Image (cartoon, coloured by chain):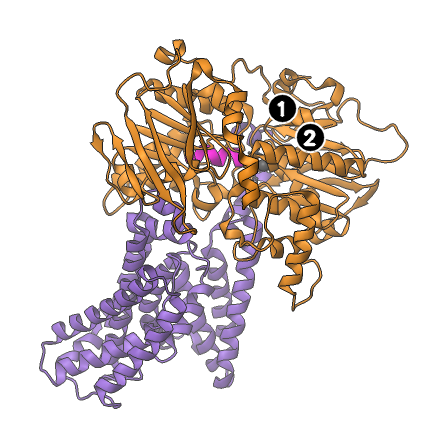
Amino acid sequence: MTPDGRTGAPAGAPSAGGSPPALELESITKRFGGVTALRDATVRVRRGEVHGLVGENGAGKSTLLKILDGQYPAGSYEGVVRIDGEAVALHAPQDARARGIAIVPQETSVIETLSVGENICFGEGGGPFADVRAMERHAAAFIDQLALRLDARTQVARLSSSQKQLVMIARALYRRPRVLILDEPTSALTAEETARLFALVRQLRDGGLTCIFVSHRLDEVSELCDRLSILRDGRVVDELARADFDVERIIGSMIGRRLTDLYPERTGDAADAGPAAAPAAPPALAVERLSIRHPERPGDFVVRDVSLAVAPGEVLGVGGLVGSGRSELLGAIYGRHPIASGRVLLGERELRISSPREALAAGIGLVTEDRKRDGLLFNLGLRENVTLAYLRSLGSVVLDRGREREIAQEAVRRFSIATRSIETPVGQLSGGNQQKVMLARALERGPRVLLLDEPTVGVDVGAKAEIYRLIRALADAGVAVVVVSSESAELLGLCDRFVVLRDGAVVDRFGLGEASETRLMTAAMAAKTSSEEER
Amino acid sequence: MEERRVRATPGGADDARARRLLYQTLRVPEVGILLALVVAVAVFALVNPSFVAWANIESNVRTIAFIGIVGVGQAMLIIAGEFDLSVGSVAALGAVVAAILMSDHGLPIPLAVIAAVALGLLIGLVNGLLTVKVGLPALIVTLGMLFAARGLAYVISGGTQVYPLPDGVRTLSDRVLGLPMAIWVFVVLALVADVAMRRSGFGRRLYAVGGNREAAQLAGIRADRVKLAAFMLTGALAALAGVLVMAQLGSGDPQIGMNWELAVIAAVVVGGISLRGGVGSIAGALLGVLFLQVVSSGLVVSGVEATLQPVAVGTVMIAALGIDQVRHRRFGG
Ligand SMILES: Nc1ncnc2c1ncn2[C@@H]1O[C@H](COP(=O)(O)OP(=O)(O)OP(=O)(O)O)[C@@H](O)[C@H]1O
Ligand SMILES: [Mg+2]
């Protein structure tokens, strides 16, 4: 690969084979004001293949997909879009729909107030007096066909982020598309759901579906895709056939340099961790026999009798499936959910709080898993988002703007946030950079205890490595960190000790010495299937 | 990384700069309404030059002073993600209460005014508590208050105007430095509010809570309190506006503020305040108030039938919402 990444039309572009590519995005250049998101990018997708699209945060993946989906109308960019060899002008998502293109966008976009079934069938016939029951029946049959774990009648607002993702996938497939676009579909899914999705995509591909798949998890990309286009800085810098997939090469093309270590080295006690299932030092945070009531089912609990402890300088990994009570546990420590029984100790002191505000004041920071739902303020810019938890220190009446700018600029530097300026609305940042803004905010007040719920959702490998390094550096500086993650590799690479939750209870705990992916997964899933049947 | 991108823009740097300038200008939210305002004034001035005569300008500004004062509160409240339909009734109640306190009970004028404003504050508190703490929709709560407060104004006043008022009331409608008092109150309030929304912690919290209540709360902001404060401010400003109208009329009329609620909401929405919450500015909102006033008085000056005015206002509002949608889609938001 040439160092400037300007390979133009990628070598080995598929001109052979007689029939034209199912999709061809040729020499696309797309600007947003002063930002060029895509420059002369060409991607060709053959019929019946799963085509991977990878690149760092902000490389232009979502932008390319939105062009293909008609969200950025023809004329707002340079270049040509061809479908089956025919140049088309897509002016709106309806145009794409009419040509059999369906997209599952990166951002959650479901109608919270409607049921799963209505969301799936929304806009598909029915007329103004859509029969909700009929919709839900159709949807239920369809869900069964896809073998997804969803109930068509549940209101979407009650679903977890992973279930919402499934709804979006089902909705796209319900239209029987010829081309399916998946923009980071797996970042919110559990391992099990991901496996199910892959099986489904393969099956549909064998039936002739063409699919574009975006993910930051390169193992997934290697597993699923037939070919791969790599974007960097808005350019297509490499194109690989399955035979040539090589993680190092892919990463090299993506970030334009070699990535040496994804996970930072552990220092201190953790490095020579024996069978330490308990923390070495007196804990900074201890949770004792904590239970949290289920918000809807009276008498039931989402977290039961959980005890754990984290020492300063330690990173505790919390494993388990989505819905196992991990997020609620963090939420309760942070004063977001009321505690039914048990207690939380901060150092020696019992923490008695009833709001996130008090948690912040006590030196606890939280990064939530769903930045759209309860993370970022999309009506404001990067600066305001970074300093949101810090307003009091910026002045009791009038905010110190100079100070605020400095803080935001420092955050941009420290986290290498790719942005035009600190005033850019967060909605215009790419997904991974939005995640960095959330981290920056949580760290602004210098917490002693940091709770991270899926801290690298939608973050590219390069940035992941940075975030891991940052977390490790914080730990080394004496912060006690709790990380919830659905990626076993991430937990194993990052954490010193592990606790696994299942159905709200701790089912396993172990130190680094005994940790393995198998142990994590076995603990998380054991007996899961039988309890699942009951519901 | 970004800098590299910008520098690497191929060809005509001037072209790029011009495009960027245009883009940035269009992104300033107040530009649209300001342009519309300038065009409207120009058109009406051409049709009838007396439209830009000082007397007409002053009378227009005085008219918007009252609604503008209410608009300041309403804009803040809508930015915080709620709204208040009871402002007109609260203005009437404030006016009647102040009038009765000063004329029948002989309370000193400043105290009567303060009492009326405090009453507005209290009503705002009730609206806020029912909406924020009890969780009823603001539409229902403030619609109920619209009837209740108006009814109370009629009951207290016996259904008639309260007058005569003590002579001192005239100071409230006197000219100060060449302009009526109400205009000064409005201008000062508008300036303070605009700066507060842009620069103060309170303003930032209003935007945060209106943008995403849950996220704001997780960042340590007491969302409920912020909303309550906005409700109370709206109530207080409505009562204050009512008192100023009372001073100008020379009587406490229970019909003061009729239909203000919708006029105010229409105006601030035209001025770029989004009913979704979290978006807009005081400057924009007040330009919206001014714009609607220009349109309706301009139509009168141009000889259009008065009955057609509501049609014009409605059209403008829908057009503004349409433009807002397009802007939202193009520039994100
Ligand atoms: N509406 C917009 N206005 C301005 N700039 C934008 C807008 N949308 C995207 N951008 C910019 O375009 C570039 C490409 O963004 P895009 O969302 O396509 O990245 P991505 O490859 O999908 O990244 P991620 O992996 O983080 O989702 C980024 O620099 C982003 O800031
Ligand atoms: Mg993206």
Please tell me how crowded label 1 is: few (under 14), some (14-19), or many (20+) other residues with Cα within 10 Å. few
Quadrant of res B58? bottom left
Q: Start and end of the magenta stretch?
A: A431-438
Relative to A24, is A352 on the left or the right?
left
Residue at image position (28%, 79%) is B92
SS assignment at label 2: strand
Main SS of the magenta part reads helix
Q: Which of marks 2 and 1 is nearer the N terminus?
A: 2
Parent chain of label 1: A
Please tell me whether residue A2 belongs to the stretch shown in magenta. Answer: no
Relative to A193, is A451 on the left or the right?
left
Quadrant of res A276? top left
Ligand 1 placement by image quarter: top right
Three-letter amino acid code at disc 2?
Answer: Gly
Q: The purple chain is which one?
A: B
User: Residue A464: horizontal and vertical position, in percent?
Assistant: 50, 25
The residue at which mark 2 appears reads as A52
Q: In this view, does A284 lie above or below A438?
A: above
Residue at image position (46%, 77%) is B296
Residue furthest right in the image = A18
Q: Nearer the viewer, residue A226 or B121?
A: A226
Residue A147 visible in the shown view: yes
User: Residue A254: horizontal and vertical position, in percent?
Assistant: 61, 23
Please tell me whether residue A435 belongs to the stretch shown in magenta. Answer: yes
Residue at image position (16%, 70%) is B114
Q: The orange chain is which one?
A: A
The residue at which mark 1 appears reads as A219
Parent chain of label 2: A
User: Residue B109: horizontal and vertical position, in percent?
Assistant: 13, 76
Three-letter amino acid code at disc 1?
Answer: Asp
- The answer to whether dots 2 and 1 both sit on one chain is yes
Question: In 3D space, how far apart are the residues under numbered discs 2 and 1 (Cα atoms)?
Answer: 12 Å
